[in-house]
């Protein structure tokens, strides 16, 4: 169908949160001409017994295909009129149009309404003059020692322990037999680390009472947070046999250990590297806090609504595939996450708008420089790195990272950033 906006009656209504509704009227003569066109095309294709191709009477076509003709005509007319109305009103939807109040009667105007979201048009009255405090990035000795302890745990070895009862942190091998009304099932073997949540609390408590070679019967209750909802609160009688217990033997925290985990001359060198890495991480978190505070200040100084479509998409990215999820729990999760999702979308829009206003989008030269930096760090060819990033879809993320950094440097320059007292 070829239709000009001048032939249509178009009204636009602005709703909340960048919702727009088009009310469109298509004149009866245009609707009739489109339906006749579709009918002629169909008549030339269809084959009916007793009629020559292209010579089927209009009354027969109408009786046999009338509803289908109407549906195809409505689909075409609404689609074409919608696109023409968008062009005429200079609107760019960011969501699928939702058709409502569609009305069609033969030899009358066709009318419909269609609603959709558009991108927010954000104007800033204030982008600076905020007071932001950068959190401390100091790394305490305790944090360094915790990392060292994790490294010891990761490099520990399991050794059999013949005497004594298991304790938290031990690895045990058990056989569990379900006893149901006196009928025994085949025992099932399990290996687990006590205290890591590998078994329900009642089973772990039972294992603690056994020595290697012992077995006994226990009544256990499945906890209220058990993954299988049907078993929550149920009681079960089990026979548990402790077959083996192992203790984790940790390496000594010395220079030899330091050399075993990397190219470190001694334990002091390893500690220094851990402190350096933790300091970089803390500095990154402090910078993230500054950025978050700045964005929140901009949003609060320049409040604006965001389209529900954008918030829904963000929620979907957080919740992932919700197929098979309990509808009530999913609705509860969406409700709890809604404020966070709304603020996250606002932050994204602020960054994009500031970049657009100030011309801060990443340039090709800046992107090439960053690719070369990555290539140098990984001893790779820049062209290969570029191709790899492009193939994996990470090139666009790299552009966004560069743009965001420029935006935040711009925002920080307009506000006062102070370091928190030690």
Image (cartoon, grey):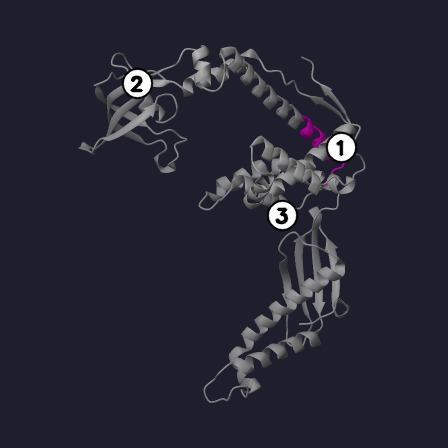
The percent coordinates of residue 385 (x first, y second) are 57, 40
Q: Main secondary structure of the magenta part?
A: helix
- Between the C-alphas of marks 1 and 3, the distance is 29 Å
The percent coordinates of residue 141 (x first, y second) are 55, 11
Seen at 59% across and 35% down, the residue is 375
Instruction: Please give the residue where the numbered disc 3 appears in the rendered image.
Output: 309
- Between the C-alphas of marks 2 and 1, the distance is 58 Å
Numbered label attached to residue 410: 1
Instruction: Please give the residue where the numbered disc 2 appears in the rendered image.
Output: 246
Residue 236's place in the image compared with 61, above or below, is: above
Instruction: Select label 2 or label 3 by which is in front.
Output: 2
Numbered label attached to residue 239: none
Q: Is residue 221 left or right of residue 108?
A: left
Residue 123 in sight from this viewpoint: no
Splitting the image into 4 quarters, where does residue 180 fall? top left
Q: Earlier in the sequence, mark 2 or mark 3?
A: 2
Q: Is residue 121 left or right of residue 171?
A: right
Q: In the picture, which quadrant includes the N terminus?
A: bottom right
Q: Is residue 292 magenta?
A: yes
Q: Is residue 12 magenta?
A: no
Splitting the image into 4 quarters, where does residue 91 fall? bottom right
- Between the C-alphas of marks 2 and 3, the distance is 54 Å
Which range of residues does the magenta coloring cover?
290-304
Q: Earlier in the sequence, mark 2 or mark 1?
A: 2
Q: In the picture, which quadrant includes the C terminus?
A: top right
């Amino acid at each position: 169908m070829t239709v000009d906006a001048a032939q249509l009656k178009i009204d636009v209504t602005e709703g909340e949160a960048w919702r727009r509704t088009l009310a469109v009227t298509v004149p009866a003569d245009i609707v009739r001409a489109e339906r006749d066109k579709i009918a002629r095309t169909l008549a030339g294709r269809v084959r009916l017994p007793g009629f020559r191709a292209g010579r089927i009477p209009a009354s027969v076509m109408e009786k046999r295909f009338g509803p289908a003709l109407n549906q195809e005509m409505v689909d075409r007319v609404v689609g074409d009129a919608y696109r023409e109305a968008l062009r005429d009103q200079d609107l760019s939807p960011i969501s699928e149009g939702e058709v409502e109040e569609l009305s069609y009667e033969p030899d009358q105007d066709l009318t419909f309404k269609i609603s959709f979201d558009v991108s927010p048009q954000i104007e800033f009255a204030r982008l600076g003059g905020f007071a932001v405090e950068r959190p401390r990035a100091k790394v305490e000795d305790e944090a360094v020692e915790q990392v060292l302890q994790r490294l010891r745990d990761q490099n520990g070895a399991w050794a059999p322990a013949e005497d004594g009862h298991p304790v938290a942190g031990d690895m045990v091998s058990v056989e569990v037999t379900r006893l149901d009304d006196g009928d025994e099932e085949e025992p099932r073997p399990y290996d687990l680390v006590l205290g890591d949540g590998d078994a329900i609390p009642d089973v772990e408590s039972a294992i603690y009472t056994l020595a290697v070679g012992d077995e006994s019967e226990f009544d256990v209750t499945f906890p209220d947070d058990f993954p299988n909802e049907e078993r929550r609160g149920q009681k079960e009688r089990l026979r548990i046999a402790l077959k083996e217990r192992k203790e984790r033997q940790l390496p000594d925290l010395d220079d030899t250990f330091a050399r075993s985990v990397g190219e470190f001359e001694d334990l002091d060198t390893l500690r220094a590297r851990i402190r350096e890495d933790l300091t970089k991480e803390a500095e990154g978190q402090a910078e993230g806090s500054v950025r978050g505070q700045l964005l929140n200040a901009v949003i609060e100084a320049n409040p604006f609504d965001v389209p529900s479509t954008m918030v829904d998409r963000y929620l979907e990215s957080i919740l992932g595939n919700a197929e098979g999820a309990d509808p009530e729990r999913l609705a509860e999760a969406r409700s709890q996450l809604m404020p966070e999702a709304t603020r996250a979308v606002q932050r994204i829009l602020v960054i994009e708008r500031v970049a657009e206003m100030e011309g801060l989008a990443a340039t090709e030269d800046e992107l090439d420089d960053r690719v070369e930096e990555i290539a140098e760090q990984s001893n790779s060819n820049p062209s290969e790195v570029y191709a790899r990033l492009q193939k994996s879809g990470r090139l666009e993320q790299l552009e966004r990272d560069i743009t965001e950094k420029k935006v935040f440097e711009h925002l920080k320059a307009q506000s006062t950033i102070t370091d928190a007292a030690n």
